[in-house]
Image (spheres, rainbow, N blue to C red):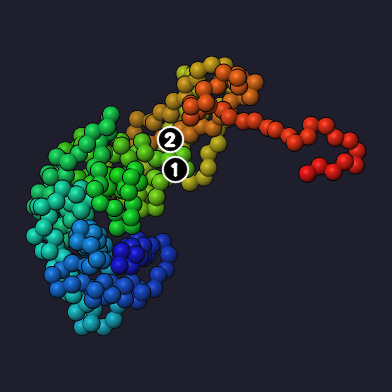
Amino acid sequence: MALTAYAIRFLTDAKDVIEIDKGVLDKAREFLIKKQRANGSWDIGEEKQNLLITAYIARILAVSMKEAFQGNEKDTKAKSEALNESVKHSLIFLRSLIDSTDEPQLLALYALTATEIKDTNEAERINKRLEKLALNEGTGSYWALELNTPFYGWGLAGRIETTALVVQSLSMTSKNKDLVNRGLLFLLKQKDRYGVWYSTQATINVLDALTSLLSNNESGSNDTHVSIFVNGNLVKTVSLTSNDLITINVSDFMKTGDNSIEVKLSDKSSPSSAQLVTSYYSTWQSKDTESINRNNSSALRFSVNYAEDRTHLSKQLI
């Protein structure tokens, strides 16, 4: 059922850029509504996971309420009412249990759903609880999940996914902008060297959080310029309005030893983040292989042995 809900989300988001079969979207929503239990939940076999999957599906259906059903006016109205009732029914179920859990992922999904149906008071109440569950790490803050995500995310990827959901929720109703910024800083620091966040769901939720924050930001220009400095010297100023790959050769500005690279935004630019990824090698000649600490995980280990070290023409080597 989680996969069906994700398909609904994908089709809802994709309609603005590609043509989709809205009939498929309608059937997927009707399928989930039919699978909803009498108490308002969706059952996948384990009580705690049932709460989480119910919150996840409820949020997806709430977001999709903006999309009208296909068909004649009478059928469309009936299906829309069924969808609306399904979301409300699931929230009633969750509301009866939400105060007995401190699972931040569940709380965030519930608050986001409440926001979607304009229940601002309930969303604000839950967000105040989420503020108290924040954990600090350096200059950032995160929220630790205790259950696997609906797509079985856990560990760092699950933490990122959970934090992204909380940041989305807090950005909509919370007045604690400092905490929102700390959550955002944590997320930005977790980006891997490929420019994503370890898993598909974590990446999607982080991008959602970034989009939500940018849409709430009234300042800034659509035209973002950055200047690249190496060791205090301006190398080049470029515009980031293009999706084209920008390559800048900074080798002429580098020196032996320590180097500093700075990426500076122009004063009126929109909020942006920068990620520096480097690859390097350590030459074999610089390693004293005899004095290597074998227990050091970063130690270079490489050895070659040959069964024979001498040969001659026409000799077969095995």
Q: Using the image as rendered, state which of residue 62 and residue 280 is in the foreground.
A: 280
Q: Quadrant of residue 273?
A: top left
The numbered disc on residue 275 is 2
Q: Percent from the top left, x then y, of residue 214?
A: 30, 44
Horizontally, residue 291 falls left or right of residue 133, namely right
| Residue type highlighted by circle 2 | Gln
Q: In the rendered picture of this protein, how many numbered marks are placed on residues?
A: 2
Q: Quadrant of the N terminus?
A: bottom left
Q: Using the image as rendered, state which of residue 132 and residue 174 is in the foreground.
A: 132
Q: Quadrant of residue 317?
A: top right
Query: What is the secondary structure assignment of the residue under circle 1?
Result: loop
The answer, for residue 8, to whether it is visible in the render is no
Residue 29, compared with residue 176, is above or below; it is: below
Judging by the rendered image, the residue that carries numbered circle 1 is: 195
Horizontally, residue 181 falls left or right of residue 278, namely left
| Residue type highlighted by circle 1 | Gly
Q: Earlier in the sequence, mark 1 or mark 2?
A: 1
Q: Percent from the top left, x then y, of residue 227?
A: 45, 29
Residue at image point 22% right, 67% down: 42
